[in-house]
Amino acid sequence: MLTVAASEVGSEWLTIEQAIDFCNLGKSTLYKHLAAGTFKSVSLRRPGTIRGRRYVSRASILAHLDGLTPGEGFGYATTTP
């Protein structure tokens, strides 16, 4: 895991809650993408602590969604107008 300073986190980084709202995924589905490395994320925490705040890259979410073709994903079919 990569740890970055709080000053490096800007509007391009979303909290878990914001990422869920942004891409309209459930929490468990979002964490599956994070575990698979589909979405880039960082964890901010104080040295020596276990808990912290996780941020997800908005650009990595958009890049993944842009790369999907109709019918691809977690079992959801998409249609094109």
Image (tube, helix red, strand yellow):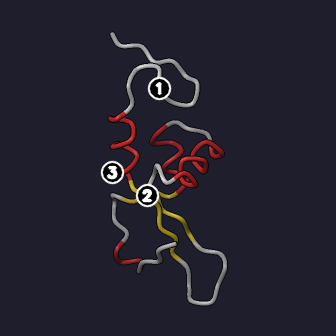
Q: Is residue 33 above or below residue 57?
A: above
Numbered disc 3: secondary structure: helix
How far apart in space, not on screen, are marks 2 and 3 (Cα)?
9 Å
- Residue at label 2? 40
Q: Position of residue 40 (x, y in %)?
A: 43, 58
Numbered disc 1: secondary structure: loop
Q: Are marks 2 and 3 in contact (CB under 8 Å)?
A: yes
Q: First in sequence: mark 1 or mark 3?
A: 3
Q: Is residue 29 above or below residue 78?
A: below
- Residue at label 1? 72
Q: Which quadrant of the figure has residue 9?
A: bottom left
Q: In the rendered image, which quarter contains the C terminus? A: top left
- Residue at label 3? 59
Q: Is residue 78 above or below residue 74?
A: above
How far apart in space, not on screen, are marks 2 and 1 (Cα)?
20 Å
Q: First in sequence: mark 2 or mark 1?
A: 2
Q: First in sequence: mark 2 or mark 3?
A: 2
